[in-house]
């Protein structure tokens, strides 16, 4: 069937319409980037997420382009409607996806659904616009102009998204903002295409209504983001993953970012250097020539970063339960930057296993230094990693003059727990010297330095650290009265007293 | 076949495939031994003699804990010239264990209370296994941390959630609490009791217990009657005590003697007012100890060999046996035989025994069903976390123990060992009931029992294997344990000595071991090798 002739092309403002191509192209790419980023944050494995999102999106665009041939009449009106639809679905895509992740089990279904719908709608845009312009512009100019601007729009979007929009606005606001832009293109085209539209009042009202909804969304964007674990996290969530072992969440705010495991803060990028310097360097101060280093826990790679500062180190074995954790340390850009890609160092071998089972069931050459950095003992499964049995198993894998450093919770907030860990290590036959320092995001934090043989408190640390100096190192080993030693039971597998102590002591602070 | 026939046949078989009923469970499994058929074959009677009888000093019949311990003692006493015959392919009897890709798991007995310092035999064995680390300042033994049950030890499912411990404190009235304490005061009284010779009323093994009438009189009445006399009616308390009877004896309050009921609690007390002794366990349960004994015996243990006839003649005891691995008849001529099988087997196998020892029919065994569920992952645990022993209050079964608990594995695949005593009064009837259950019926029993606590279990089960123990546990019914005729069953019958936990009337590792050592020492003494006792 021949197409009905479009009327009075001379009244169309072709150059301006080309500009709208630029805008809708950037919008389209932004939605794609939003979906890809959001799904890699939430699901991990960014290569997989980006590939599948792009695949679904492009094929949906293909579908849209195909479907465009079934649209016959009133193309200008269709175009405006299309802009509004893209504005709504694309604009709300990020909030919708966050909600779906938080409240349904069908996140992937929603993800690919939204991507497919947006892709299809975006796929319709350019063919329709080209058909609107085809009688006014020569074909070769039309193709060249539209495609040039389409690709340029994509370039703008892809450069500005990571540099400007993501850091300044976050995912939710970015997607809403571009939705608004899409709706604005719709409104603007009611002027540009006026001659083809007939009465435009209703259409303009519709455009304004859609823009108002999106603006409202933008105003309450904070609420959308927070709906996901709002009680727990004060800051914007940039990464969240449920592994079989724990829930891993990264948040960002106030110039730093934080890692939470099951809602418990593990580090803040603002002051983690204090914690990790204190965990790692005192042990090296006593054993500066350590070659083989064992790290139990510490899947974030931050302790490894500190260990790698010691030139004597030839091999690091890091045993962390959760592959999701060590993957995040490797691939999540913020964490990777913070740990200096430490897990990629050829000296590092990552083992994903329960450290205690690993110690029990494997054997190998002994280690010169062991860093034990587990989450606090608030469950039985974690409490076992602080038992005399654990420290005995650990000793079996160490040289006779090996040094051990153990993160051992706060001597101020959980004084009995802290000293219970020291007493337990002693019961397992170790010489123990506990120490502490202030880590602002945690409070006063404690460690235990230990060895099979007696050793002197270190007085010299690696130069050039951010927090530890020789004086500061020696000072950590003095305990003021309110944190000084208290008598406690030994934490054994069959009593797990530490779990009870710990939960009782921390309850007072929450 | 013509092409058309071929197609038709294909269509038919496709149709029949489609019609075949969907299996009830998305997992598989099987019924495993003990070799019921072999055991029953014994009753068939008449076995011709083998071609020759190999001369030997001591022959032990039965490779359960009692028989293995007898062999262990003989070897320790300098006798090398002995064999232990076990009819099953695997030794251990009711302390046997299994192993699959996840790890080891028990098939029945799974724990041992830590022995007191007077229980020399168990201490000796644990020392040999590397489980005794030394003695503390008070002289009490200290055991390897990895063998003491890891906390949390037990939890109970009630009111739709899991609670820590076995005694349900939630919702207990003050009267419940009062009676709970009143009962444990009685236990303390008995834990403190010493007779004129200084012997305790209750101790493990029971050969160390007092035979003073004040104590043994407790055997004359049922545990239920004893509680009634003291007005101990609290449903929670009675549930706990009934659970103890089912768990340790396969019996109920009504079919357990008060002596046995109090034994369970008082013999495990470290002292009056003190806690119960902690428990020792391993992923494979008491199979750990069995495997140690088996290694100690080496080639002297012969599995897959069933004694079919034992006949005492002037110059020795002729033992005929069927070696069903090699499908041949074998014979020994032994100076001494230690019969370490159950009494009902002795009646069929030992010539003249049934007529001479009518009291052997007094021993009655409760049947048990044990299922091992191999899981791909852990069920969801929104309330109190998975413990070693997991008990469901409103169930005929006892719940399950977790094989990976002791191997420290808190994530991923595991094996749950589920226990169900058939504790009805009529043991024979219960046995017939158990024997009638095929695999799907067993699987149904297990899954329906666990479903309320673990609605997500079915999708996690990779295998479910079932052991039906026909004669699992001797039942300490009132009047059995101190009956002189029953006690006399442990005495030698000519040069045939007896060892089995049944002879104590209490199904416990320590009892089986104690009888094994006693029987071995009788044989050693008779052959002039009287040394210091290990008991
Ligand atoms: C389900 C269950 C759970 C238990 N849990 C515990 C526990 O947690 N702790 C505990 O201490 N105890 C427990 N027990 C008790 C357990 O029975 C004892 O600990 C102990 O294993 C008994 O050993 P036994 O040698 O006396 O008897 P059995 O185990 O009965 O051994 C007798 C052996 O003799 C063999 N035999 C029989 N006839 C012949 C023949 N003709 N020829 C050759 N061999 C023969 C049998 O095959 C068997 O292996 C449990 C028992 C059951 C059934």
Image: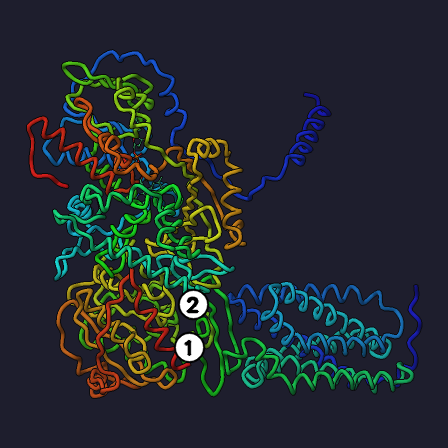
A168 shown above or below B71? below
Q: Which residue corresponds to the image point at 22% horizontal and 63% vertical from the top-left?
A: A367
Q: Is residue B304 left or right of residue A96?
A: left
Quadrant assignment, res B477: top left
Q: Which residue corresponds to the image point at 49% horizontal and 85% vertical from the top-left?
A: A253
Q: Is residue B484 left or right of residue A334?
A: left
A86 shown above or below B227? below
* The N terminus of chain A, quarter of image: bottom right
Residue B300 pos. (x, y %): 20, 29
Q: Chain of mark 2?
A: A
The quadrant of the rendered image in which ligand 1 is seen is top left
Pointer 2 residue Cβ closer than 8 Å to ligand 1: no
Q: Which residue is mark 2?
A: A325
Q: Closest to the observer: A472 or B379?
A: B379
Residue A20 pos. (x, y %): 74, 82
Q: Is residue A36 left or right of residue B111?
A: right
Q: Which residue corresponds to the image point at 36% horizontal and 34% vertical from the top-left?
A: B365
Q: Is residue B83 visible?
A: no
**Label 2 neighbour load within 10 Å: few <14, some 14-19, many 20+:** many
Q: Closest to the observer: A289 or B479?
A: B479
Q: Which residue is mark 1?
A: A265
Mark nearest the camera among 1 and 2 is: 1
| Labels 1, 2: one chain | yes
């Amino acid at each position: 069937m021949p197409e009905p002739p479009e009327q009075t092309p001379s009244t169309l403002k072709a150059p301006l319409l080309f500009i709208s191509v630029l805008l809708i192209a950037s919008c389209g790419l932004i939605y794609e980037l939003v979906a890809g980023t959001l799904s890699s944050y939430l699901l991990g494995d960014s290569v997989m997420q980006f590939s599948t999102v792009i695949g679904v999106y492009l094929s949906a665009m293909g579908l849209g382009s195909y479907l465009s041939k079934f649209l016959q009449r009133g193309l200008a009106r269709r175009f405006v409607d299309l802009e509004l639809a893209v504005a709504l679905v694309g604009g709300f895509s990020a909030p919708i996806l966050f909600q779906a992740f938080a409240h349904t089990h069908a996140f992937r279904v929603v993800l690919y659904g939204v991507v497919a719908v947006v892709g299809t709608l975006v796929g319709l845009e350019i063919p329709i616009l080209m058909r609107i312009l085809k009688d006014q512009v020569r074909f070769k100019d039309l193709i060249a102009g539209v495609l040039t601007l389409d690709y340029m729009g994509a370039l703008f979007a892809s450069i500005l998204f990571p540099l400007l929009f993501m850091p300044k606005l976050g995912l939710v606001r970015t997607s809403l903002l571009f939705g608004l832009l899409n709706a604005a293109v719709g409104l603007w085209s009611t002027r540009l295409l006026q001659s083809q539209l007939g009465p435009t009042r209703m259409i303009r009202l519709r455009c304004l209504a859609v823009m108002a909804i999106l603006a409202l969304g933008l105003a309450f964007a904070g609420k959308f983001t927070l709906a996901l674990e709002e009680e727990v996290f004060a800051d914007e969530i940039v990464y969240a993953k449920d592994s079989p072992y724990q829930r891993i969440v990264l948040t960002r705010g106030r110039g730093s970012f934080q890692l939470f495991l099951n809602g418990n803060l593990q580090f803040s990028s603002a002051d983690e250097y204090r914690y990790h310097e204190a965990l790692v360097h005192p042990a090296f101060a006593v054993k500066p020539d350590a070659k083989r280093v064992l790290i139990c826990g510490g899947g974030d790679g931050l302790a490894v970063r500190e260990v790698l500062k010691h030139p004597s180190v030839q091999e690091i074995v890091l045993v962390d339960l959760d592959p999701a954790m060590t993957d995040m340390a490797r691939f999540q850009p913020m964490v990777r930057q913070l740990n200096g890609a430490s897990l990629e160092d050829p000296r590092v071998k990552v083992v994903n296993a329960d450290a205690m089972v690993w110690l029990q069931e494997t054997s190998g050459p002994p280690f010169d230094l062991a860093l034990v950095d587990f989450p606090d003992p608030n469950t039985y499964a974690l409490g076992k990693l602080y038992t005399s049995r654990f420290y005995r198993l650990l000793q079996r894998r160490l040289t006779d003059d090996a040094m051990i450093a153990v993160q051992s919770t706060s001597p101020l907030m959980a004084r009995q727990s802290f000293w219970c860990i020291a007493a337990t290590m002693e019961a397992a036959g170790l010489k123990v010297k506990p120490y502490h320092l202030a880590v602002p995001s945690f409070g006063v934090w404690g460690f235990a330095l230990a060895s099979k043989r007696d050793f002197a408190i270190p007085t010299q640390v690696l130069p050039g650290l951010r927090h530890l100096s020789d004086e500061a190192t020696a000072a950590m080993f003095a305990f003021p009265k309110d944190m000084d030693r208290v008598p406690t039971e030994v934490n054994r597998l069959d009593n797990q007293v530490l779990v009870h102590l710990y939960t009782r002591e921390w309850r007072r602070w929450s | 076949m013509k092409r058309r026939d071929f197609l038709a046949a294909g269509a038919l078989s496709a149709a029949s495939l489609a019609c075949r009923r969907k299996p009830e469970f998305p997992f598989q499994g099987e019924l495993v031994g003990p070799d019921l058929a072999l055991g029953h074959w014994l009753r068939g009677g008449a076995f011709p003699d083998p071609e020759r009888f190999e001369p030997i000093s001591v022959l032990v019949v039965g490779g359960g804990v009692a028989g293995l311990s007898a062999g262990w003692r003989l070897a320790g006493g300098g006798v090398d010239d002995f064999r232990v015959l076990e009819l099953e392919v695997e030794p251990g009897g009711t302390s046997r264990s299994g192993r699959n890709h996840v790890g080891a798991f028990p098939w029945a007995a799974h724990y041992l209370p830590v022995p007191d310092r007077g229980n020399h035999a168990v201490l000796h064995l644990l020392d040999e296994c590397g489980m005794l680390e030394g003695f503390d300042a008070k002289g009490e033994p200290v055991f390897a941390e990895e063998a003491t049950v890891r906390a949390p030890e037990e939890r109970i499912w009630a009111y739709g959630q899991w609670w820590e411990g076995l005694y349900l404190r939630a919702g207990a009235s003050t009267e419940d609490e009062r009676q709970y304490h009143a009962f444990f005061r009685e236990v303390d009284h008995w834990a403190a009791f010493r007779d004129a010779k200084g012997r305790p009323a209750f101790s493990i093994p029971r050969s160390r217990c007092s035979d003073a009438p004040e104590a043994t009189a407790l055997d004359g009445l049922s545990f239920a009657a004893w509680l009634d006399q003291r007005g101990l009616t609290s449903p929670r308390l009675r549930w706990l005590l009934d659970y103890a009877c089912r768990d340790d004896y396969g019996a109920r309050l009504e079919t357990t003697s008060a002596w046995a009921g109090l034994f369970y609690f008082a013999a495990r007390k470290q002292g009056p007012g003190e806690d119960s002794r902690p428990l020792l366990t391993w992923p494979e349960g008491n199979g750990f100890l069995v495997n140690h004994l088996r290694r100690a015996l080496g080639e002297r243990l012969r599995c897959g060999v069933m004694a079919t006839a034992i006949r005492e003649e002037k110059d020795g005891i002729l033992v005929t046996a069927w070696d069903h691995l090699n499908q041949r008849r074998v014979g020994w001529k032994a100076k001494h035989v230690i019969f370490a099988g159950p009494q009902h087997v002795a009646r069929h196998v030992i010539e003249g025994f049934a007529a001479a020892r009518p009291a052997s029919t007094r021993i009655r065994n409760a049947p048990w069903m044990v299922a091992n569920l191999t899981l791909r992952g852990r069920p969801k645990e929104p309330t109190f976390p998975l413990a070693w022993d997991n008990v469901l209050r409103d169930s005929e079964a006892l719940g399950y123990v977790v094989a990976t608990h002791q191997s420290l594995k808190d994530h991923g695949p595991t094996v749950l060992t589920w226990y169900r005593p058939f504790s009805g009064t009529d043991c024979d009837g219960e046995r017939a009931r158990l024997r009638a259950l095929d695999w799907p019926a067993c699987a149904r029993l297990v899954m329906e029992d666990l479903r309320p606590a673990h609605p997500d279990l079915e999708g996690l089960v990779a295998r479910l294997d079932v052991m039906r123990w026909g004669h699992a546990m001797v039942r300490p019914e009132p009047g059995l344990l101190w009956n002189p005729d029953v006690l006399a069953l442990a005495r030698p019958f000519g040069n045939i000595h007896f060892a089995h936990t049944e002879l104590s009337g209490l199904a416990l590792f320590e009892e089986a071991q104690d009888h094994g050592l006693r029987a071995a020492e009788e044989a050693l003494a008779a052959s002039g090798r009287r040394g210091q006792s290990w008991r």
